[in-house]
Structure formats: structure tokens, C-alpha cells
Image: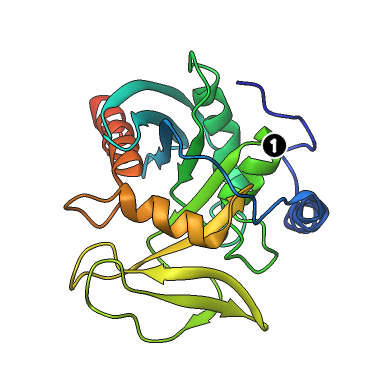
Amino acid sequence: MIARSLHPWNVSYKEAVEIQNKLRKELVLDVSISVPKAVAGIDVSVSKSSSDGWAAVVVLSYPYLELLEESWAQGKIDFPYIPGLLSFREIPLIIKALQGLSSVPDVFLCDGQGIAHPRRMGLAAHLGVLLRKTTIGCAKTRLTGRHGEVGQAKGEYALLEDRGEVIGAALRTRSGVKPVFVSPGYAISLGMAVDLVLACCTKYRIPEPIRAAHNLVNHLREAQGSA
């Protein structure tokens, strides 16, 4: 896979914010997509004792969620952890992992935000702009916005709003378990993003493609003795 090179990665906080505001103009949302055949999950794990990082992409069939392919990359992650700038920390390594795929998945599920971000440019949105491929953000925690009460049953959700704009949804993927925060990244509507994330959830809170990528990067990190 080829990602567009639109900006440098080793930048200051101010420069990163300026890049996000510029890339926001390239967002494409509310696109009706056909039923995917392959859905990829993306996750990154970083050593607690060094700057070593691992990125993994795991591709599953849809709707059967059977393993089709996986790829990973290891490297140094030098950009600091700053809420709202996760893409600058993780995407360079994610792109390396994506280059190992033999085919292009239809949809990418990212462990991070899509447009549910102060500048509407979370990791999934940023990656989608670079790849020009459909991406969805599925985060375990809320970065910005507010939502109402979410019903306790699986499939219940409440819209996430920020400054009068709907930016995502707090979605209950397992009855009685904390919701996840779903938002479009690129080339998909919120409704389709919610439906797809829910369809990728089996008995766990996290959708299977992301869970598989999460398990892979953690295994790689532990195998290297970098807990």
C-alpha cells in the first residue's frame, strides 16, 4: 500500500496542529460504501522502558471474521504522547506495517479517534486522508464531545456531539459493558461506521479486527522483552 507523503512527521506541537487543520479540508465523509469483503484492524504498542514500538494490521474476512492476512513493523517512536496528536506518534510505523500487505482491505478499523477530535483529525481520519481509503475510529475512551445516556443492551448508542456538530457515537458493543467511541475517519458515514463496528464485535467489547491487531502487537512486544 502507498500512503501519500503530505507533510513531515518530526514537527513541533504548533506545526502538528497546523497540519491537522490543513488536512481537515481534505476529509471526505458520508460516503455510501458497498458491503466490505475484508476489514483490517490496526493497533500500536510501545515499550514502557524505551522508544521501541510495534504496529500491526490484521485483515479479517467480512462478515465471517476469519483471518486473511497480517503484517507488522517494528521501529522507534520518538514523538511524545500528547492527547490529540496520536497520529504523529503512531502513523509512521503503521504505514510501514501496511506496506507488508499483499492486498488492500476494504475498510480499516483503527484503535483511536476518527473525527471525534477537537480538530476533526484523529488517527483514523488522518490515516484515511493519507491512504484515501475508508477508515473508522473505534476508541476505548472519549477525547472530546458529550453524549447522553447509553442503553445497557448491545447495539444501543448515543450520539456524540461537539459544538453543535455530531462527531461520533458512544456504542454499547456488549451488554452491561462500557461503550466504545465510534467515529467516521474517511469515506464513510457515521451510521455505516456504527453498523460495521457492531457487526465486527462478537463476545468482546472491542471489534475483532482491532482485538486481533492488539493481541499481535502485545505478543511481539513481550517476545522482545519490552513490557
Left or right: 182 in relation to 131: left
Left or right: 64 in relation to 149: left
On the image, which quarter does residue 212 sit in?
A: top left
The number of numbered badges drawn on the structure is 1
Q: Residue at x 27, y 51 (%)?
A: 201
Q: Residue at x 31, y 38 (%)?
A: 63
Name the amino acid, label 1. Leu
Q: Quadrant of the N terminus?
A: top right
Left or right: 99 in relation to 140: right
Q: Residue furthest bottom?
A: 148
Q: Which of these two is toward me, 75 or 115? A: 115
Q: Is residue 142 visible?
A: no
Would you call the spot at circle 1 few (<14 residues within 10 Å), some (14-19), or many (20 or more)? many
Q: Residue at x 37, y 39 (%)?
A: 47
Mark 1 secondary-structure assignment: helix
Q: Which of these two is toward me, 170 or 82? A: 170
Q: Residue at x 39, y 40 (%)?
A: 45
Residue at numbered disc 1: 130
Up/down of 179 relative to 30, above or below: below
- Residue 205 drawn at (x, y percent): 25, 57
Left or right: 41 in relation to 97: left
- Residue 12 drawn at (x, y percent): 75, 51
- Residue 188 drawn at (x, y percent): 59, 51
Q: Is residue 125 visible?
A: yes
